[in-house]
Image: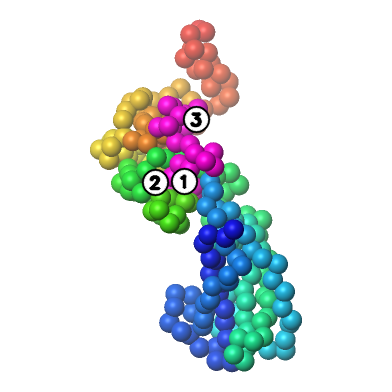
């Protein structure tokens, strides 16, 4: 059963005028049979929409607007659908736009973390790492159903914990089995910024044998982050020698 309607974007072929909204599309409506349901991430469901193609066409203005309109369904890697109808909205034209296998702004691998207090976590990541919020979707109870933030050009996905769906935070689990790493400039200053925002030092910043200057901290929500600046390019043979020495070999 659908709990949250998905808003589809519609355009009018008659006027091609702008209604003043953000995308310049003339109208929008709610599809009763389309919805998104919050799981860990975004799970979108779209009905099998059937409509007869008519002779009417979208204006050039609206075709351009449609190319730039990217509701969350596009980010989920699915095909993007827009509906248009004319004459009292009695006829509908189904326009399908093919989506790239990799949405713009994403890398092939994206970490997805779960936290106990999503709203507070987003605030911390902005203050600690200078993150920018790319997407924020709240569940009816105010919890973060899905969010995406960007740090140094890389995207991280996040949600509040939903134990019934298998999304459990480090606080509930009592620890984590992995951590995240951020390459950035001036690691010493950025590390201090993160600690001042509420992080806890686990490994202080220092020069590492593999050519990074880095330190590791734990955020208030149980996730570990290593911040690093690469300071030296090391040939493989020298890397092996340093690794052996670091591990007590020679």
Residue 192 locus on image (x, y percent): 28, 36
- Asked which quadrant contains residue 236, the reply is top right
Front: mark 3 or 2:
2
Counting from the top left corner in percent of width and height, residue 161 is at 45, 41
Give the residue pinned by disc 3: 178
Q: Which mark is residue 158?
A: 1
Query: Label 2 crowding class (10 Å Cα cut-off): few <14, some 14-19, many 20+?
Result: many
Q: Earlier in the sequence, mark 3 or mark 1?
A: 1
User: Relative to 226, is 13 on the left or the right?
Assistant: right
Task: Please name which of the two marks, 3 or 1, marks the residue nearer to the observer.
Answer: 1
Q: Position of residue 17 (x, y in %)?
A: 50, 88
User: Is 87 in the magenta?
Assistant: no
Which mark sits nearer the N-terminus, 1 or 2?
2
Depth order, front residue of 152/22: 22
Disc 1 to disc 2, C-alpha distance:
8 Å
Between 144 and 239, the one nearer to me in the picture: 144
Q: Which residues are magenta?
A: 151-180
Q: Residue at x 48, y 43 (%)?
A: 162
Secondary element under disc 3, as helix, strand or loop, is loop
Q: Is residue 155 above or below residue 201?
A: below
Q: CA distance from mark 3 to mark 2?
A: 19 Å
């Amino acid at each position: 059963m659908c709990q949250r309607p998905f808003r589809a974007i519609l355009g009018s072929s008659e006027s091609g005028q702008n209604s003043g909204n953000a995308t310049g599309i003339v109208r929008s409506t709610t599809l009763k049979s389309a919805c998104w349901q919050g799981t860990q991430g975004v799970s979108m469901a779209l009905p099998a929409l059937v409509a007869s193609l008519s002779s009417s066409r979208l204006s050039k203005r609206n075709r351009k607007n449609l190319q730039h309109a990217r509701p969350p369904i596009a980010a989920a890697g699915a095909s993007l659908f827009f509906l248009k109808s004319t004459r009292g909205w009695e006829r509908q034209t189904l326009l399908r736009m093919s989506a790239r296998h990799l949405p713009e702004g994403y890398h092939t691998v994206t970490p997805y973390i779960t936290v106990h207090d999503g709203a507070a976590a987003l605030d911390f990541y902005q203050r600690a790492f200078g993150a920018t919020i790319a997407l924020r979707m709240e569940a009816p109870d105010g919890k973060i159903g899905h969010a995406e933030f960007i740090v140094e050009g890389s995207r991280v996905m996040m949600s509040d914990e939903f134990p019934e769906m298998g999304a459990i935070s480090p606080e509930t689990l009592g620890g984590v089995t992995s951590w995240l790493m951020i390459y950035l400039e001036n690691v010493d200053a950025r590390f201090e910024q993160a600690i001042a925002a509420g992080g806890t030092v686990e490994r202080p910043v220092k020069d590492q044998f593999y050519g990074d200057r880095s330190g590791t901290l734990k955020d208030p929500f149980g996730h570990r982050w290593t911040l690093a600046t690469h300071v030296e390019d090391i040939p493989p043979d020298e890397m092996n020698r340093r690794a052996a020495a670091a591990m007590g070999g020679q």
